[in-house]
Amino acid sequence: MSRENRQLLALLVITFFAFMIHNGVLDANIMEARNLVTAREILQHHNWLVPTMNGVLRLEKPPLPTWIAAIMMQLFGQDSLAILRIPAALSAMLLVFFLFKLTKELTRDEHLPLLAGGTVATSFYIFFMARTITWDIFCHSFMLGAIWMLYRGWNRKEQAWKEFTWAGVLMGLSFLSKGPVSFFALLLPFLIAFFASYGFSGAKMQWKPLMVALGILLAFSTWWPLYIYFQHPEFSAYVAEKESAAWMNRSVHPWYHYWSFPVQSGIWALPAAAAVVIPYARKKIGQFGNYKFLALWVWAAIILLSSFPEKKERYLMPVLIPLALITAYYFRYLMHAFKEKEYTKADSILYSIQGYLVGVVSFALPLAVIYHNYQYHDGLSIGLQIIILVVFWAIGGYIVRSTYRKKAFRLWSGTVVMMLAFCLLVIPSARNFFQKNPDYRSYNDLRHMEKVQNMPFFFNGPVPGKFIQVVWSSGHLIQYWDTSDATGTPVATPLVVMTHEPPQEVFNESFREKYDFEELGHYDLDMKKKDGIKIFSNYVTIVRMKQNMP
């Protein structure tokens, strides 16, 4: 087996553990719920081109990830989040593969492709998004593939028709996944870095294939927005205005909000931060690659994202791709410097802090798990606690020893293995860490409760955005009902209503005289604390007209 195939096999194992193992432990978050509810309604209404979410047009996001979710539901049903999240995991695997191949284009070094792929796979926000079926992992994965093809094409001496054709297809798929987001956050920073570092000679030679790529991109990316515009012109204008206003007025933070971005890479935060400090890292990393290109890609992305008032941590995901790449180059420098004894005092200090800190984490993590199990009765068996302790202490010992002996690759591989052990042994009990609410009760019971299957569902008030998680969990479309001073029901009974207070306190006396209430129980989707998110805590009641009423 060739070295490349061995490295790809290693990355396959890494990504399988990082992205797929125990990926159904936690409930769907709000972004997933939006996608999954929309996918469910696509199947219910057989309308793939004009999707709805809880009965309302859902045109804010392009439909490709939702179509993928709908296909998974059609094939495997709606009950297993672990299965529904598989496409996101596969997309993340594709992202790792694309970075591996791009790194092989950037360098002839035999270690760097594996270092880059393993680092990006275990970077926090990549790891997190790969375990949630949202739009981001799809659009950035496709765009990274397009970047790989563009780089290959611009470095060919003959016209690269195949590369630019694939670049056009992948850019089109990225647009169909989340519109122009990845074009701005990942492609544009790459183009700035590429042309500033390598010039325009390759682009001038490849202008004809590039035109083909742009034509394919336009064909892929414009047909759905144009269809929606002609079908719903007023709503399309509303969505455009709403989304542009959100960038300026929602989640507004100061310009420097993103400048702690290395933290989002998780366990790689310290070497990532060191790698982007230009005076320190330029000559070191420059021995193994074009540091100007690598650093510009990261910094251009940060500056561009910082230019918009709206800022959310998940928007930093595309930054983590070039950040993982430059971090891999930094580890490659450390491997060489320690082997040849050419390292500086700063190298030694930073390396030691990183290694011993990760070692301490590996030693402390099983103790935290055991303590939490003892304190909150998580139900972990003694045998599993012993296995967790032995495995993480063995990894911690390996990491500390590698740090002391200045074996940079062993430190890197030990850190990756620690992450994989975390996925295998700790994530199954992660729910116990998050679930602090003693009243937690998922609405999933309502999915299969036979008596309510054909009943309409209502919520006593306007349906707020975060309530979409209840809509997904319950398995039913939930409509608004203004119950204040209600004298009748919005549709013929029986129906199901969700109320924050017991129904006897919600409905007035004249209503109670006409209708019977069958309480199905109190549900609370908030895992963190009792009386937390109010809209998650509801009494679920069947309302029927009394038999003696006309």
Image: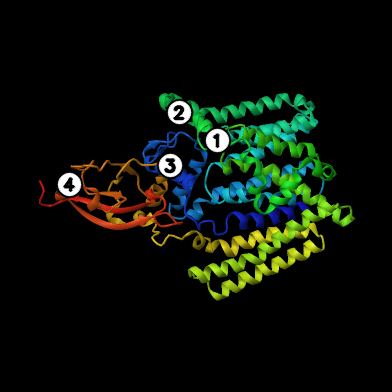
Res 191 → quadrant: top right
What secondary structure is marked by label 4?
Answer: helix
Residue at 28 percent across and 49 percent down: it is: 497
The label shown at residue 422 is none
The residues bearing labels 4 and 1 have C-alpha atoms spaced at a distance of 46 Å
Of the residues shown, which amino acid type is indicated by label 1? Glu
Mark nearer the N terminus (2 vs 4): 2
Q: Is residue 54 left or right of residue 107?
A: left
Res 323 → quadrant: top right
The residues bearing labels 3 and 4 have C-alpha atoms spaced at a distance of 34 Å
Q: Position of residue 344 (x, y in %)?
A: 86, 52
Q: Position of residue 367 (x, y in %)?
A: 60, 69
Residue at 44 percent across and 27 percent down: it is: 238
Residue designated by label 2: 228
Tags 2 and 4 touching, CB below 8 Å: no
The residue lying toward the viewer, choosing from 378 and 118, is 378
Q: Residues within 10 Å of mark 3 (few under 14, many from 20)?
A: many
Residue designated by label 1: 310
Residue 481 sits above or below residue 396 on the image: above
Residue designated by label 3: 38
Front label number (2 vs 1): 1
Of the residues shown, which amino acid type is indicated by label 3? Thr
Mark nearer the N terminus (2 vs 1): 2
Mark nearer the N terminus (1 vs 3): 3
Res 491 → quadrant: top left
Q: Position of residue 41 (x, y in %)?
A: 40, 42
Residue 345 sits above or below residue 381 on the image: above
Residue at 39 percent across and 51 percent down: it is: 536
The label shown at residue 511 is 4
Tags 2 and 3 touching, CB below 8 Å: no
The residues bearing labels 2 and 4 have C-alpha atoms spaced at a distance of 43 Å
